Amino acid sequence: GNPSVPWDYETKEDWPRQFPLFCAGKRQSPINIDRFSVQYSHWVGIYPIYFYNYEVIPEQQIAINNGEQLQVMHNSKVPPSIKGGGLHGTYLLSQYHFHWGSDSSKGSEHTINTVRYPMELHLVHYKAQYGDMMNALRYADGVAVLAVLFEVSSRDNPALAPVLQQVQNIRRGRGTPMTPVNAPYAVASLLPDDTKSFYRYEGSLTSPPCNEVVIWTVFKEPVHVSQNQLELMRTLLDLHDEPIEDNFRNPQPLNNRRVYRSFF
Ligand code: BO1
Ligand code: ZN
């Protein structure tokens, strides 16, 4: 697993061979969440996830086209953070990014009862006590990702507008200027109304090097996105000036894992 070896989604089925250190492991992500085999957990359900500074409008967020994803780094002095919801300790937001498909029949990484969604948002946090993201990747509970599924709607999702406004400035991959997202909005506006109902399991980063360090939270309630907004995502270009699309990994074997739910 040499992290400097380039990877792309065209060869995603080869990641276990290309990055055998972690991508061939037994707690890989994403997974299919089968509603009828998930188990209610009192431990996960008793306390809601508490969101700190999620309502604060960051002074500045930076949108980046990294050649594989549209990623947003925040630049706030006090980063948004989460605790509760069965997580041990506080996790600080590092970045968030999106996975989407070439058409709306696919795009999400997690599937629910094998149903694919057209887009999935990942809010990537690292455990505060581990100091930074790089160090957190060394611990089995180092990273907590919140996943939000999108379903197609006839209405635009206003929470996506500030990020999508930057797409024209970062259309080409790596080497394009990092663009501040200035429009006022809070990260919280990207979350579903019901953050108390979610699925929880232990998994990995969904792309190489696939470190098995992620406590996953997948919200039950999807949010909405319009076809126009999805089309805008699909105009982003990768390193070869090809559209970035289908930047998702397929569900991985559950193996010896349980998926919990926070709700009855
Ligand atoms: S995901 O949320 O599971 N799709 C995911 C996949 C890959 C990463 C993060 C989240 N990669 C890591 C890099 C680190 C970097 C970190 C934060 O993202 O391996 O080098 O510091 O941006
Ligand atoms: Zn992701």
Image (spheres, rainbow, N blue to C red):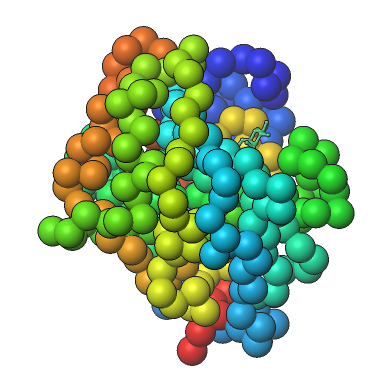
- Residue 204 visible in rendering: no
Quarter of the N terminus within the rendering: top right
At 49% across and 33% down in the image, what residue appears? 180
Above or below 88: residue 228 = above
Most foreground residue, 185 or 14:
185
Q: Position of residue 166 (x, y in %)?
A: 36, 33
Q: Position of residue 185 (x, y in %)?
A: 44, 55
At 43% across and 34% down in the image, what residue appears? 70
Figure disc tally? 0
Q: Image quadrant of residue 83? A: bottom right
At 47% across and 28% down in the image, what residue appears? 179
Q: Image quadrant of residue 43? A: bottom right
Q: Image quadrant of residue 113? A: bottom left
Above or below 200: residue 42 = below
Q: Position of residue 213 (x, y in %)?
A: 71, 48
Give the left or right position of residue 15, taking residue 170 as reference.
Answer: right
Q: Position of residue 49 (x, y in %)?
A: 62, 73
